[in-house]
Amino acid sequence: MSVIVCFIDGVGLLPHAAAPWTTAHLPTLINLLGQLPHSNLQIDQPNLYFRAIDATLGVEGLPQSGTGHTSLWTGVNASALLGRHYPAYPAPSQRPMIAEQSLFAKVQQLGCTSLIATVHRDHYWDLVVKREQRATAAALAAQVVDLALPATPEWLAGQAVTWDITGYYLQQWGALAGLPTITAHEAGLRLGRALRLADLVHYECYLPDFVGHRRIVETPEHTLELIDSMLGAIISQMQPSDSLILVSDHGNLEMIDHTSHSRNPVPLLVIGAKAQAAAKVEDISQITPLILDLLI
Ligand SMILES: [Zn+2]
């Protein structure tokens, strides 16, 4: 029995099915939900739960990744605690709280194991020390329990997935120059296989937020199609006792006419025998408790 949390940065829901959802080819989501995702859709079935959850956390302004990720991977409403949304990486003042409230420490306290499946830059913590890399909330939460961060060797060995799913966009940036890319299907197979290696598999995909900000030249539709293909492959590897959580931190990609975040609610999709545990989740600060519920 294992849980995979598949985080997709910057994907919100509109009140009705609209572009880019309606203009993308999303067979996995259509097959699961029976229709395209939107914020008024709620599904509560024995093995499937879907609804839109709040990402604004009761704080004015556009929700941001720093406080969003911190809320997701600690179970603490980081925006309310800080009094504002904080962009990109965690607020320095919240790093001690992330260590104290780390999702991965809580998983360890249950006697369960975690596996980070997201490829990080080689020698990540050395780069952080040299201030050439800022630590993500997930990395800080992992550090407190000495969880390994996979890097290029694990990616080449088929054991981890880059945050852009395929590696293609990182190659365009020169980050993985000369190395082979993979399909979104292969990315999903890798994540699904990781379910057999740990109780919790944690993967972060930042691609939709980068596309929403136009920092990567890609259509929102194709971005959703990559996620859909990856999701289908993960599901193909799940055993009946496994669970999957798909969630985001704030809207962005769904707003095709502008390039900033939105206050739209975000999707929460849960697959597995305990999917109903998600019914009590109202906002993104309640994802850590949900993960723990699914593990016990
Ligand atoms: Zn974000």
Image (tube, helix red, strand yellow):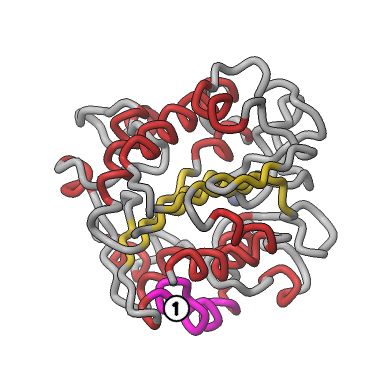
Residue drawn at (55%, 54%) of the image: 275
Residue 156, picture quadrant? top left
Residue 96 lies in the magenta-colored region: yes
Disc 1 secondary structure class: helix
Q: Quadrant of the C terminus?
A: bottom left
In this image, 113 relative to 63: left or right? left
The magenta-colored residue range is 94-107
Magenta: main secondary structure: helix
Q: Quadrant of the N terminus?
A: bottom left
Count of marks overlaid on the render: 1
Residue 231, picture quadrant? top left
Residue at which label 1 appears: 106
In this image, 91 relative to 177: left or right? right
Residue drawn at (85%, 60%) of the image: 60
In this image, 159 relative to 78: left or right? left
82, above or below 222, in the image: below
The extreme right residue here reads 60
Amino acid marked by disc 1: Lys
Nearest to the observer: residue 39 or residue 261: 39
Residue 150, picture quadrant? bottom left
Q: Position of residue 151 (x, y in %)?
A: 24, 52
Nearest to the observer: residue 256 or residue 238: 238
Q: Position of residue 26 (x, y in %)?
A: 54, 22
Residue drawn at (73%, 60%) of the image: 282
Q: Position of residue 161 (x, y in %)?
A: 32, 43
195, above or below 277, in the image: above
Q: Position of residue 285 (x, y in %)?
A: 65, 66
3, above or below 190, in the image: below
Residue 89 lies in the magenta-colored region: no
In this image, 35 relative to 58: left or right? left
